[in-house]
Image (cartoon, helix red, strand yellow):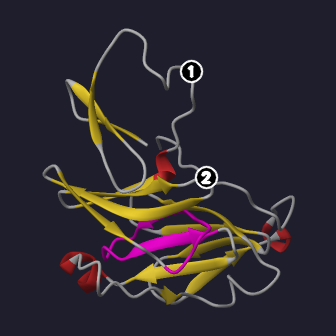
Amino acid sequence: IWIDIGDAYLTGTDERLERVPKQEKMPFDGLTVYDRRFAVIDDCVWFFMPRGKHRAHLARLRNGELKVFQLDTSNAAIVQVDREKNLWIADYGARLLRVDAATVALADPSNFPLVEALPGIGAPGTTVRDLFTDREGNLWICSEKGLHLLRDTPPIQVYSTAHGLPSENIYSVVEDHD
């Protein structure tokens, strides 16, 4: 992970961050930046910090202080926030996980329960492929069972081939400038 802090970057794995001064050539030059890998809530940045080859822990960076949350999931990869400041985590193991806003605000690594949200979406045989929060704070969930729009918890609107999508298998969604 690389975090731009102005005159330098923070980078790290295994629960440690180190400061790297900006240089003309950086190790990440030419790599793609994925904006769904982090979420900003107030003055905190939430992201997944690599730990080993195929694992990651949820981390929170606030005023230079790093807190690491060891979650009961090994496949978590995408984090987003909704308009109520709930944290949503896509687990490629097919689960959609939610941390309520009050728990997020306390940010206590020893008391950070994950709730399997909307079990019908993360049901066996369904993979949550992507999450996206639009400018109004609505959460879009891309899955093998269509595109799901969460405006409030619940109801949820599902878009499928019946609504004109070319396939039920949705990999990603983005928002244009309009």
Residue 11 is left or right of residue 33, and the answer is left
- In this view of the protein, which residue sits in the foreground, 153 or 120? 120
Tag shown at residue 30: 1
Residue 109's mark? none
Q: In this rendering, is residue 151 above or below 155? A: above
Return the disc, 2 or 1, that comes first in the chain's sequence: 1
**Neighbour tally class for label 1: few under 14, some 14-19, many 20 plus, Cα within 10 Å:** few
Of circles 2 and 1, the one toward us is: 2
Q: Amino acid at mark 1?
A: Gly
- Residue 154 point in image, percent of width and height: 50, 90
Q: Nearer the viewer, residue 87 or 58?
A: 58
Front residue of 89/160: it is 89
Q: Which residues are magenta?
A: 72-91
SS type, badge 2:
loop
In the image, residue 86 lies in the stretch drawn in magenta: yes
Rate crowding at label 2 as few (under 14), some (14 to 19) or many (20 or more) other CA atoms within 10 Å. few
Q: Which residue occupies 36% across, 77% down?
A: 86
Q: Which residue is mark 2?
A: 53
**For residue 12, what is the image quadrant?**
top left
Name the quadrant of the N terminus: top left
Judge left or right: residue 8 versus residue 78. Answer: left
User: Quarter of the image holding residue 47?
Assistant: bottom left
Q: Residue furthest left?
A: 63
Amino acid tagged 2: Lys
User: How many numbered circles does the render carry?
Assistant: 2
Vertical relation: 119 (above or below) 158: below
Q: Looking at the picture, how far across and down is residue 167, in whole percent?
A: 86, 62
Disc 2 vs disc 1: Cβ atoms closer than 8 Å?
Answer: no
The residues bearing labels 2 and 1 have C-alpha atoms spaced at a distance of 21 Å
The relative height of residue 21 versus residue 103 in the rendered view (above or below) is: above
User: Of helix, strand and loop, which one carries label 1?
Assistant: loop
Residue found 42% across the figure and 49% down from its top: 13
